[in-house]
């Protein structure tokens, strides 16, 4: 048995919130899907080229995190949602280069088995996160990811949710989730970890690792991930 999983279960969290990219699996599903769908021609060529230029500006630090993550969702305006649901499922099942951390999947499933309320919170688009959650058993109505308004089955450009940084505790509070345990891997998860009774830095980036040490949060590197 994994000692980390057992230590979390002993806390008997009634509400748990998990970041996804880098926490439940290696890699960033949102960014990977963005590149993949442009290469696949899922969005019009002109839209793809415009978004790639914006992404270059983002990587150069001239576009902020929330704006970029939001654009990765609103870029689909005018498309049938069923098309994105199908594409996201195909991507995660066959084209996502990341790897689910087995002990994190086990932890989520075992926490769910106790009857606890478990939330997936991510700034990646909700179509990809919902597809991923099929591997963890988290219901679609417990996914709080980047989302736009859907009008009669058609995606609009109206962003209705962006859980990044302070946006993560915001959406959890709106869902009336009093978080006992929270899990994240980057500085964009800091505020969500701060709101929880028990905070866990899983596979943390250097910035979150420093924050975890300062706060006294538990740090865990999944099997196969090297860390200090």
Image (tube, grey):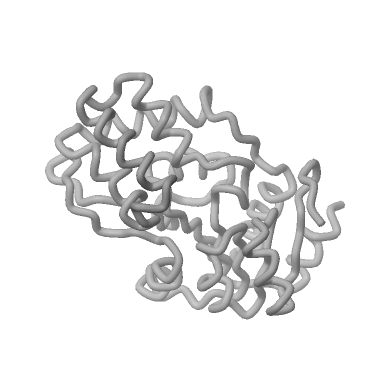
Residue at (51% x, 44% y) in the render: 133
Q: Quadrant of residue 215?
A: bottom right
In the image: residue 177, left or right of residue 227: left
- The correct choice, above or below, for 169 with respect to 49 in the image is below
Residue 125 is drawn in which quadrant? Answer: top left
Q: How many marks?
A: 0
Residue 102 vs residue 43, the one in the foreground: 43
Quadrant of the image containing the C terminus: bottom right
Q: Kindly identify the residue that appears in the image at 46 percent across and 73 percent down.
A: 177
Q: Residue at x 50, y 31 (%)?
A: 92
Q: Which of 43 and 107 lies nearest the eye of the viewer?
A: 43
Front residue of 52 and 44: 52
Q: x, y (%) of residue 86?
A: 35, 28
**Which residue is located at x 52 percent, y 51 percent?**
138
Please state the horizontal and vertical placement of residue 26, each as a whole percent of the image. Answer: 63, 42
Please give left or right for residue 131 compared with residue 14 in the image.
Answer: left
On the rendered structure, is 223 left or right of 104?
right
Q: Residue 104, image x and y in percent? A: 69, 50
Find residue 90 and report its horizontal and vertical position in percent.
44, 25
Where, by quadrant of the figure, is residue 113 drawn?
bottom right
Q: Is residue 104 left or right of residue 66?
A: right
In the picture as drawn, the residue positioned furthest to the top comes out as 40
């Amino acid at each position: 048995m994994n000692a980390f999983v057992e230590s979390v279960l002993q806390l008997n969290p009634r509400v748990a919130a998990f970041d996804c990219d880098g926490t439940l699996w290696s890699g960033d599903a949102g960014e990977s899907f963005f590149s993949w769908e442009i290469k696949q021609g899922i969005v019009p060529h002109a839209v793809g080229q415009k978004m790639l230029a914006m992404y270059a500006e983002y990587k150069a630090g001239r576009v902020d995190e929330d704006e970029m993550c939001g654009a990765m969702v609103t870029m689909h305006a005018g498309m049938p949602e069923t098309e994105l649901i199908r594409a996201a499922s195909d991507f995660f099942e066959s084209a996502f280069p990341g790897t689910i951390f087995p002990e994190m999947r086990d932890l989520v499933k075992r926490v769910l088995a106790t009857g606890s309320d478990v939330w997936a919170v991510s700034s990646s688009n909700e179509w990809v996160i919902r597809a991923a959650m099929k591997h963890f058993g988290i219901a679609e109505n417990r996914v709080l990811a980047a989302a736009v308004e859907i009008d009669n089955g058609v995606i609009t450009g109206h962003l209705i949710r962006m859980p990044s940084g302070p946006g993560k505790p915001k959406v959890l509070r709106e869902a009336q989730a009093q978080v006992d345990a929270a899990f994240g891997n980057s500085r964009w998860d800091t505020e969500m970890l701060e709101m929880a009774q028990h905070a866990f830095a899983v596979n943390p980036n250097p910035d979150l690792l420093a924050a975890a040490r300062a706060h006294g949060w538990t740090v865990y590197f999944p099997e196969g991930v090297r860390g200090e």
